[in-house]
Structures are given as structure tokens and as C-alpha cells.
Image (cartoon, grey):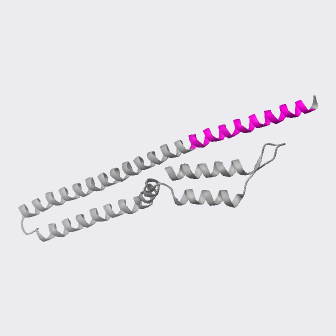
């Protein structure tokens, strides 16, 4: 977070030291310098944002893995049930166990999906809050910059008026 604030300070310095057009109030900035700062910001994004992006990209893999494990458990249960069909009681117990295993696998897959979704949501919420803070900070700095230039223009205008008198 401190690194991002440092980059914002650097952008502010670029704006303050850039060539100003007194007639329009616009500033000419060195595009490559601003792009370098933006690139540094991207390279130094908080780990939570990167981690959330990785989780999002891995979400389908996690779900597919859970389903694959569930299928494997189901197949193992079916194979075991076939081997135990020697007697009715053994078959009945095997069927019960297979059903329990299947339900446990389904519950595990549901819990894994819910847990992954909740974790991703939590990380994205944190990233969203952080981005809102950055945006509010930028907006405040932008307002300060506009106020500074408005005040400078007013002073210039008053000076010109005094010169005309």
C-alpha cells in the first residue's frame, strides 16, 4: 500500500514539475515517464489481488478436481460392491456404504465449492475496498490540483488587471 502511495506521489511530482500552459491551464507531461510509473504500479500490486486472481483462474480446476475425486470414490465403491455381492447382507451393507461415500463426496465437493467461492469473494471484497480507497485518494489529490491551478489562474488574472490599470 505504501509503495502505491509513493507512486501516486511520483505522479503528482511529474504533474507539478511539468511544463504548464498559462493560457489553458493544461500541463504537458512526459508520456513514457507516466507509463513507467503505471507499469511499476502494476508490478507492485498487493499480493492479495494477485492471489485472488490466481484463485479465480484455479476455481474451475479445483471444482473439476473435487468432482474427479468424487467420481473416483464412486467407482471404488461400485467396484467394492460388486466384489461383495456373495450374499444379500454383504450386498446391502456395501450399498449403504457406497451411498454414504457418494453423499460424503458430494458434500465434500459442495463444501469445497462454497469455501473457494467464499474465499475468492472475501479477497475480491478486500481488493475492491482497496481500489475504492485509491480512487478516493486520487480524487482528493485531483481536487487539490484543480484548486491550486484555479488559484494560480486567479492570481494571474488579477496581476494582468493591475497591469492594465
Whole-percent x, y for residue 116 in the image: 36, 53
Whole-percent x, y for residue 70 in the image: 27, 62
Numbered-mark total: 0
Q: Which residues are magenta?
A: 135-163
Secondary structure character of the magenta stretch overall: helix
Outermost residue on the right side: it is 164
Whole-percent x, y for residue 41 in the image: 56, 56
Whole-percent x, y for residue 164 in the image: 93, 31
**Quadrant including the C terminus:** top right
Q: On the picture, is 32 further left or further right than 100?
A: right
Task: Examine the structure image and report whether residue 152 is included in the region drawn in magenta.
Answer: yes
Q: Residue at x 82, y 36 (%)?
A: 156
Q: Residue at x 23, y 58 (%)?
A: 102
Q: Residue at x 88, y 34 (%)?
A: 160
In front of the other: 144 or 111: 144
Q: Residue 79 appears in which quarter of the rendering?
A: bottom left
Q: Residue at x 81, y 47 (%)?
A: 21
Task: Examine the structure image and report whether residue 13 is included in the region drawn in magenta.
Answer: no
In front of the other: 58 or 80: 58
Q: Residue 154 appears in which quarter of the rendering?
A: top right
Q: On the picture, is 80 further left or further right than 119?
A: left
Outermost residue on the top side: it is 165
Q: On the picture, is 37 further left or further right than 155?
A: left
In front of the other: 67 or 42: 42
Q: On the picture, is 130 further left or further right than 35?
A: left
In front of the other: 151 or 80: 151
Amino acid at each position: 500500500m505504501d509503495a502505491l502511495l509513493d507512486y501516486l506521489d511520483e505522479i503528482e511530482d511529474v504533474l507539478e514539475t511539468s511544463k504548464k500552459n498559462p493560457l489553458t491551464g493544461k500541463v504537458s507531461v512526459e508520456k513514457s515517464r507516466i507509463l513507467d510509473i503505471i507499469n511499476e504500479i502494476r508490478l507492485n500490486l498487493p499480493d492479495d489481488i494477485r492471489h485472488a486472481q490466481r484463485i479465480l483462474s484455479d476455481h474451475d480446476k479445483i471444482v473439476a478436481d473435487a468432482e474427479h475425486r468424487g467420481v473416483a470414490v464412486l467407482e471404488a465403491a461400485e467396484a467394492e460392491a460388486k466384489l461383495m455381492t456373495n450374499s444379500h447382507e454383504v450386498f446391502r451393507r456395501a450399498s449403504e456404504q457406497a451411498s454414504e461415500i457418494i453423499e460424503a463426496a458430494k458434500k465434500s465437493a459442495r463444501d469445497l465449492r462454497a469455501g473457494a467461492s467464499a474465499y475468492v469473494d472475501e479477497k475480491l471484497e478486500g481488493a475492491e475496498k482497496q481500489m475504492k480507497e485509491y480512487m478516493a485518494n486520487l480524487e482528493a489529490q485531483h481536487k487539490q490540483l484543480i484548486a491550486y491551478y484555479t488559484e494560480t489562474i486567479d492570481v494571474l488574472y488579477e496581476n494582468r488587471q493591475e497591469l492594465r490599470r
